Image (spheres, coloured by chain):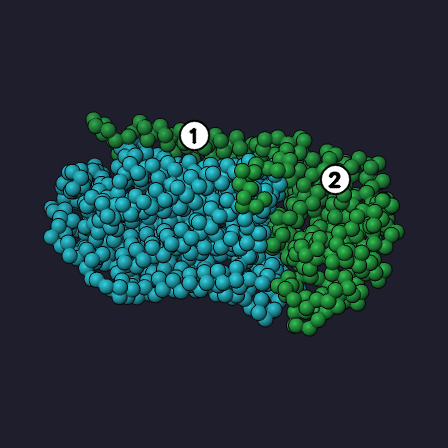
Chain colours: A green, B cyan
Amino acid sequence: MSLYGFPLLLAERSSERAPGSSYWFPPQASTFAQDVDSLYMYIMYISAFFFVLIVVAMVWFSLKYRRRPGYEGDSTALHNNALEILWTVIPTIIVVWIFAKGVFGYMDMMTPPAATIDVNVTARKWAWTFQYPNGAISTELHVPIHKASRMRMRSEDALHAFYVPAFRCKADIVPGRVTNLWFEPILEGTFDLFCAEYCGDEHSNMITTVTVHSEEDYAKWLADAAKPPTDIEAHGLWLYERMGCKSCHSMEPNKKIVGPSFAGTFGTEQKAAGGAAILVDAGYIRESILEPQKKIRDGYQGASQMPSFQGKLKDNEILALTAFIEALKDGKLTDEELGKNEDKPADSKQ
Amino acid sequence: MSAVITQPTHSHYESNEADNFLISSKGVLSWALTLDHKRIGLMYLVGVMSAFFLAGILALVLRTELMTPDQWFLTTQQYNQVFTLHGAIMVFLFIIPSVPAALGNFLVPVMLGAKDVAFPRLNLGSFYLWVSGAIFFLSAMLYTGLDTGWTFYTPYSTQTRGPVVAATMGVFVLGFSSIFTGLNFIVTINTMRPPGMSWFKMPLFLWATYATSIIQVLATPVLGITVLLLAAERVFHIGIFDPQFNGDPVVFQHFFWFYSHPAVYIMILPGMGIISELMSVHCHKSIFGYRFIAYSSIAIALFGFLVWGHHMFTSGMAEVTTIVFSALTFTVSIPSAIKVFNWLATMYKGTVQLNTPMCYALSFIFLFTIGGLTGLWLGALSTDRHLHDTYFVVAHFHYVMVGGTLVGFLGGIFHWWPKMTGKMFNDFWGIVSCWFVFVGFNLTFLPQFVMGSRGMPRRYARYLPEFQEMHQMSTVGAYLLGLGLFIALGVLFHSLRRGKKAPPNPWGAATLEWQCASPPPYYNFETPPTVNDPYDYTPLVYRDAERGWEYVQPVTASKHVSHS
């Protein structure tokens, strides 16, 4: 949307909310949702009662006792200990009750059942990676319905937070720690998964989805997701989407997200930050993956936050990425060239 | 209670126009080097209002960008810088110094019937610390653009390219300004109360200021240490907050909120103090439950130190710690509730004058009640799991800080404006400004509660289209709110040029500041004023617009009447 798009302020994309949403809440898609929502509504009723009481008293007093000719106030009502005790004790009892309800709900959220499906979650600026028990990796979360899933989450850089509104659960992901979070989905469908802790430039685009499958679909998806494509360029694309490359490197020529675009660079000569020339070849790509800070292209000094992939990518995977970048040297690729038609992983982006 | 006076104290000043503190000495240096607490207060007022103006414009920039889910005119990076600037300027340069430094400086000595604060030179020094801190902070942020959010969370703040070290040094200097102001007020209130003014005969604004000052003195050093450690971490990698060097980011959050939560009470307590004065004066009735309001200020100041952990319920604290912090958080809601109920009871059978300050005071009660009650959702652990770091939180703290502190501050400005400037403002347009602020504010932030419950995370430059309608309502509200504030500013400026001359006591208030001329002479009181009950209105009688309210009988005699 450009500045000239003012008349188009209404959403160009679909603005519909997920099926099952109510006025206040997203769909109740986990076992926590009902409990959280009912406490939310209880607090709402209590608050509404006190709020109305206060506002009605305020408005009524300011009309009834307003200054006007012939009316004289009575300034004898100045303290009343019974009243003070009353409006201290009643709110105290109510907040104790709210506190207790909150604690019980919280303990449920903090106590996973004995058997869980464990998913390793890696958060990095600004992408998610989910690794499943069978080794499959995906950028969107997939979980089965009616089974407890436990997220074992770590961050590679800044603070992030895992937040699925439809599950009513959230936990910060703290670098240097492993944070756990569990939930049991009760509704099939696809829901938003946000990063809820500010993490820099593209924080608001660190959004993915969680898909709740039936048990059979989940098993099928899991088996498919574990297989990388056989075609080397498609394998490169597959890695590009899974290893977080795509959150900083675009596939369109000259489009800078954070780092340089992958398109139209292979084989070209580029200026380095120091002024020397860099030939973008297989050697440079390998070096940039393993030691990203060694030679930085001019114009990208400010964006030099790329982590090293030493030990995270195998040699054949680096080769696949190189082949993928080479295939992009003339600009965009068609799906056919990428061999997307064969061995397409179930969750790859269309 | 000693001297019996038969003459209203303020009548002495009709002939001493030239002693008016605004014009008693002239020239830039007479202001820049002044030791007069009233001039320092006014300079603070101009300073904090400039900061407020700047950060307010930034808020409108943010709200405008959020008209569309995708980019309109700010890149994500620019958006992050703008929200950081908005938050940091509002918190460090406006809200924290607003009431204590600007109004407090002006009012504390005159409310005590004193000539000045205990340490006038320290007072001027803290003003210049504030100015230099502000310049440091602003130039650092404007030069390269800080994008850490006002909270400086690690390890993002140790990695980002922004001017974190320079900005933290600005915060460090500003912190000292705040500490010195607090120290000054504590000593002033402890040692300079006039004969007859025991603790429980102090105006409630002074109780609130005293409680605030205690927090400023005790909590701000922790912020200073935290930002120093942060700078050291960033420069020398000492390994306290950054996990790359064996530090722990959660430790930073504990340090940061150990100051910044009590700082919330630095922001709201003085606002509550203002409301206690306004409710009593404009209802023309003694404050209901004086002791309970006074004690609740102290209770809030003390409990306020123990609840910082509620900013960290999802941060990965131990479960027991989390539950303890939740329990402590609920305790702080009780004294706030007590205050609200006592303010309402003050109206009961009073004589309510619905003028501009009173309208702002009633808005405060309405908005602060929403701000306080929505804290219940966030204090309860299970609902907080869902609402933490969403727009619900954004709306909640804006209801407390803007609906509470800012609206209270505006009410206070209108209330004491005649005293500060000697001019009456146009009451009709004052009330109009209050309505715009009230309606605009609610339209801005009520939709944000709904957005938060629906799962819209905060600090998002882009958002999902399903939230667009709510965001657009919020933006329209923000413009209305902005318009209301401009009207308020216009009313005040208009009064400076065209306003009628203010009598010493236009509202019929009984606290001491209304016993000197409007504006006060540079020495405040020629003879020490007689201390009476700060909320006893029986001996005051309204003469006319020119003379305002005057004492008709000896003050001491009236006390016997009112207590018989």
* A175 or A51, nearer to the observer: A175
- Image-quadrant location for residue B242: bottom right
Q: Secondary structure at mark 1?
A: helix
- Image-quadrant location for residue B429: top left
Q: Is residue B27 left or right of residue A14?
A: left
Q: Is residue A30 left or right of residue A37?
A: right
The x and y percentages for residue B218 are 44, 59
Pointer 2 chain: A
The x and y percentages for residue B42 are 30, 55
Q: Earlier in the sequence, mark 2 or mark 1?
A: 1
The x and y percentages for residue A72 are 23, 29
- Image-quadrant location for residue B360: top left
- Asked if disc 2 and disc 1 are in contact, CB closer than 8 Å, the reply is no
The answer to whether residue A119 is above or below residue A78 is: below
- On the question of residue B439 being in view, the answer is yes
**Tag shown at residue B422:** none
The answer to whether residue A332 is above or below residue A312 is: above
**In percent of the image, x 48 and y 30: which residue is there?**
A49
- Disc 2 residue type? Thr
Residue position for label 1 = A53
Q: Is residue A29 left or right of residue B333?
A: right
The answer to whether residue A237 is above or below residue A28 is: below
* A118 or B20, nearer to the observer: B20
Badge 2 density bin: few <14, some 14–19, many ≥20, Cα 10 Å: many
* A348 or B346, nearer to the observer: A348
Marks 2, 1 in one chain: yes
* A196 or B330, nearer to the observer: A196
**Tag shown at residue A211:** 2
Pointer 1 chain: A
- Work out which residue is located at the far front of the displayed protein and give it: A330
